[in-house]
Image (cartoon, grey):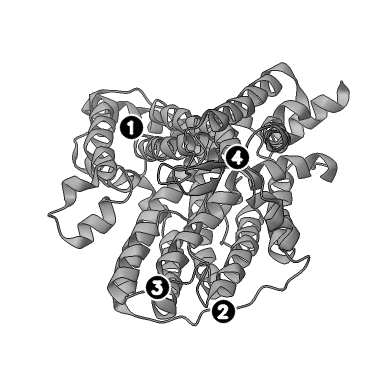
């Protein structure tokens, strides 16, 4: 019983010392939660460039996927431990951003695809990442534009935007031929039920590892299903397909045991057609990162993020993205999925998260490990994701309600979600606006919601009575401090 209490205290402490036998499973939860999301953007963009399966560049795509795992691990370690001012020392997992997909698709369309277009994306990412790094350095004077009502609205928007992703996985993956089938729904429900039972029916280490246990249980059930249920189906057009919940062991068998990642597998190309829109997106990403860090600190640690944590986190976000581009990988940002995992489990231990980062690096060096995780059925991930993503929404609400929800704050949240978030999730409303506006606001509800929240926080007058109270409190605090110094 004593060990359990020690573990519980260590797990909930960022700098606590934790044995590897306890840290590794907790870190593995984070890897499982973000693994598919870390690779999906790369699959989409390389496919759009014509570098996917069946092309002469298929081997290049495999190398890029390998590099994506390596870079995610390295940048996560930078975020956790920091080098100088770079890195927030916050419990954040970094990975390939899906927020850039819309912008990159537009770049590919404008440049005609191919290796040149992908190189232009890399060149733009190098410059954009450096710009975000500079922005992070000067973040402290900009902090006043991000009070709890603004960061809370951004965090809430992040959670809302991920709910559809979680439900999509719950049904087996929105692109699956058997999406929403009884097998997928039952498998996802089973995983969710196991997580709930373990989370609330046990204590200590077992409870904090509920996500990992649920996913492992899902793997086992999917394996058994492969022996007792048909693994293929036929579409309405008569095309045979493999069901989404089937484990593809051939992919694991064909993967190499060891392979050294290649630096600059794609030569960067610096083209303003890519640089201009991508730089705008990096500004938006900085706002999202502020929201993610705010959410993880409130949800996991129970306090607001400091200026140093936000500044270092954004700098890591930007410079990590530039590093990723040197390895041919899309920008790396804070992973909202893992913010939800921290908010749900409250496990913020740096050693635990670092063990997950090391596992990602090993996946980059040992493709067979990566293949084992990449065959995870989407419905297994979805069973865990719906709960994790909902936890982000709760963290956003906690931030918003940190201060009394007066008429001014209520207006900021209402308009930001109603107009801003609504505009982002219904992009057709922007069809007749300039392309720059569509790129910024039409791909995600997070961006316009953040923009509206920041704008309203600047222009809406603050309540005079509230300002007077704040001034009085500040004066009293200064007086108390002066008396303490005198004594």
| Residue found at the very far top of the displayed protein | 201
In x, y percent, where is residue 153?
Answer: 36, 36
Work out how far the residue at label 3 is from the one at label 2, CA to CA, in angstroms: 14 Å
- Left or right, residue 156 beside residue 362: left
Q: Disc number at residue 245?
A: 4
Q: Disc number at residue 124?
A: 3
Which numbered disc flags the more N-terminal residue, 1 or 2? Answer: 2
Relative height, residue 361 to residue 443 (above, below): below
Q: Nearer the viewer, mark 1 or mark 3?
A: 3
Which numbered disc flags the more N-terminal residue, 1 or 4? Answer: 4
Q: Are marks 4 and 2 in contact (CB under 8 Å)?
A: no
Which numbered disc flags the more N-terminal residue, 4 or 3? Answer: 3
For disc 1, the neighbor class at 10 Å (few under 14, some 14 to 19, many from 20) is: few
Q: Nearer the viewer, mark 1 or mark 4?
A: 4
Q: Residue at x 23, y 42 (%)?
A: 423
| Residue found at the very far right of the displayed protein | 2
Q: Tag 3, which secondary structure?
A: helix
Q: How many marks?
A: 4
In x, y percent, where is residue 476?
Answer: 42, 29
Which numbered disc flags the more N-terminal residue, 4 or 2? Answer: 4
Q: Residue at x 81, y 39 (%)?
A: 22
């Amino acid at each position: 019983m004593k060990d359990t209490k020690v573990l519980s205290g260590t797990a909930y402490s960022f700098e606590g010392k934790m044995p590897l036998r306890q840290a590794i499973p907790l870190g593995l939860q984070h890897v499982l939660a973000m693994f598919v999301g870390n690779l999906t953007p790369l699959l989409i963009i390389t496919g759009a460039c014509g570098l996917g399966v069946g092309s002469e560049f298929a081997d290049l795509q495999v190398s890029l996927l390998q590099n994506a795992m390596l870079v995610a691990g390295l940048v996560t370690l930078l975020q956790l431990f920091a080098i100088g001012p770079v890195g927030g020392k916050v419990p954040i997992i970094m990975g390939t951003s899906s927020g850039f997909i819309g912008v990159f698709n537009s770049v590919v369309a404008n440049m005609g695809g191919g290796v040149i277009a992908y190189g232009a994306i890399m060149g733009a990412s190098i410059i954009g990442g450096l710009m975000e790094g500079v922005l992070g350095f000067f973040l402290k004077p900009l902090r006043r534009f991000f009070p709890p009502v603004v960061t809370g609205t951004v965090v809430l928007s992040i959670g809302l935007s991920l709910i559809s992703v979680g439900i999509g996985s719950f049904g087996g993956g929105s692109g699956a031929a058997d999406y929403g089938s009884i097998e997928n729904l039952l498998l996802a429900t089973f995983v969710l039920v196991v997580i709930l039972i373990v989370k609330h029916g046990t204590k200590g280490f077992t409870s904090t590892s509920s996500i990992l246990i649920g996913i492992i249980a899902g793997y086992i059930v999917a394996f058994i299903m492969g022996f007792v249920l048909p693994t293929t189906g036929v579409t309405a057009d008569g095309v045979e397909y493999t069901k989404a919940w089937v484990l593809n062991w051939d992919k694991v068998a064909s993967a190499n045991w060891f392979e050294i990642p290649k630096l600059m597998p794609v030569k960067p190309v610096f083209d303003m057609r890519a640089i201009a829109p991508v730089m705008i997106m990096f500004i938006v990403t900085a706002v999202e990162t502020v929201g993610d860090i705010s959410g993880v600190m409130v949800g996991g640690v129970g306090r607001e993020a400091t200026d140093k944590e936000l500044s270092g986190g954004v700098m890591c976000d930007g410079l990590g993205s530039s590093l990723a581009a040197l390895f041919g990988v899309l920008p790396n940002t804070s992973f909202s999925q893992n913010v939800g995992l921290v908010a749900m489990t409250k496990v913020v231990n740096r050693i635990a998260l670092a063990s997950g980062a090391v596992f990602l690096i090993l996946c980059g060096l040992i493709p067979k490990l990566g293949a084992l995780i990449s065959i995870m059925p989407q419905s297994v991930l979805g069973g865990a994701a719906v709960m994790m993503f909902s936890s982000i929404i709760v963290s956003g609400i906690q931030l918003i309600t940190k201060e009394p929800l007066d008429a001014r704050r209520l207006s900021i949240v209402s308009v930001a979600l109603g107009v801003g978030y609504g505009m982002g999730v219904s992009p057709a409303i922007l069809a007749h606006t300039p392309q720059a506006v569509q790129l910024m606001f039409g791909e995600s509800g997070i961006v316009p919601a953040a923009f509206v929240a920041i704008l309203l926080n600047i222009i809406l007058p603050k309540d005079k009575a509230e300002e007077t109270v704040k001034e009085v409190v500040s004066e009293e605090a200064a007086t108390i401090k002066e008396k303490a110094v005198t004594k």
